[in-house]
Amino acid sequence: QKEVEQNSGPLSVPEGAIASLNCTYSDRGSQSFFWYRQYSGKSPELIMFIYSNGDKEDGRFTAQLNKASQYVSLLIRDSQPSDSATYLCAVMLNNAGNMLTFGGGTRLMVKP
Amino acid sequence: GAVVSQHPSRVICKSGTSVKIECRSLDFQATTMFWYRQFPKQSLMLMATSNEGSKATYEQGVEKDKFLINHASLTLSTLTVTSAHPEDSSFYICSATPGDTDTQYFGPGTRLTVL
């Protein structure tokens, strides 16, 4: 079992719809969770981080964390073609210092 | 804030040469920097963790004598790919963590092509 798992996609949604990206992790002691967006040929850019159970909203993005079920998700409201990218879930595993463990990424395609 | 730069952005070299890549935190001090490698259509692979003033910690399977890392200051880490070969061609990305957070901010990456 991989430590951080994501569906590779592609996840295809129409413009204006809500895109839901999911991530599960194996280490129950993990404390910090991050979502990065990576456009093709570019480096990852931070979208959000979340530490506590529940929802965290930032503009069109909402991160959701459920530590009991060991999953973290990212919702993108009013999806735009410019949101088309690979979304990387990253987890700071317990006792890993500042090291992040990345999922394989989910490719999102937003169709005009 | 939290800007990380990398230089060069792209390099093409002949097999056998050494290539140095610089990673700088522009507006914060980074006690820890990370070096990743990414092959086409694959996810990030952590190569090593670099701590200022101490030796880097390499991930399993990464040759420390081939990938030399020097974290000379709180704002600069360098990765030198020694005697590069075509199989070293990849996208090399660094990230840095400000001292008061655990968030990693990525540089723009360096695309290395070894002929």
Image (cartoon, grey):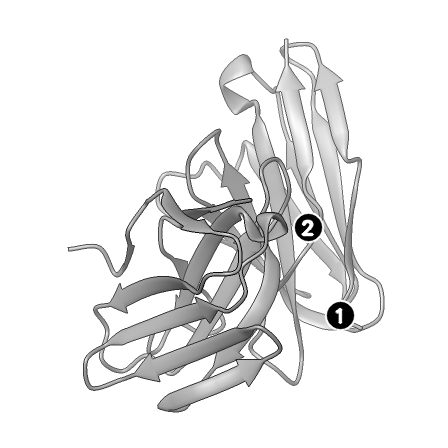
Q: Are marks 2 and 1 on the same chain?
A: yes
Q: Give the chain of mark 2.
A: B
Viewer can see residue B19: yes
- Circles 2 and 1: CB distance less than 8 Å? no
Q: Earlier in the sequence, mark 2 or mark 1?
A: 1
Amino acid, disc 1: Ala
Residue at horizontal 73%, vertical 17%? Answer: B12
Quarter holding residue A46: bottom right
Q: Give the chain of mark 1.
A: B
Image quarter of the N terminus of chain B = bottom right
Q: Residue furthest right?
A: B27
Q: Residues within 10 Å of mark 1 (few under 14, many from 20)?
A: some
Residue B22 % position (x, y): 76, 45
Decide: is A67 above or below B64: below
- In this view, the residue in front, B15 or B42, is B42
Q: How many marks?
A: 2
Residue B68 % position (x, y): 61, 40
Image quarter of the C terminus of chain B = top right
Residue identifier under label 1:
B2
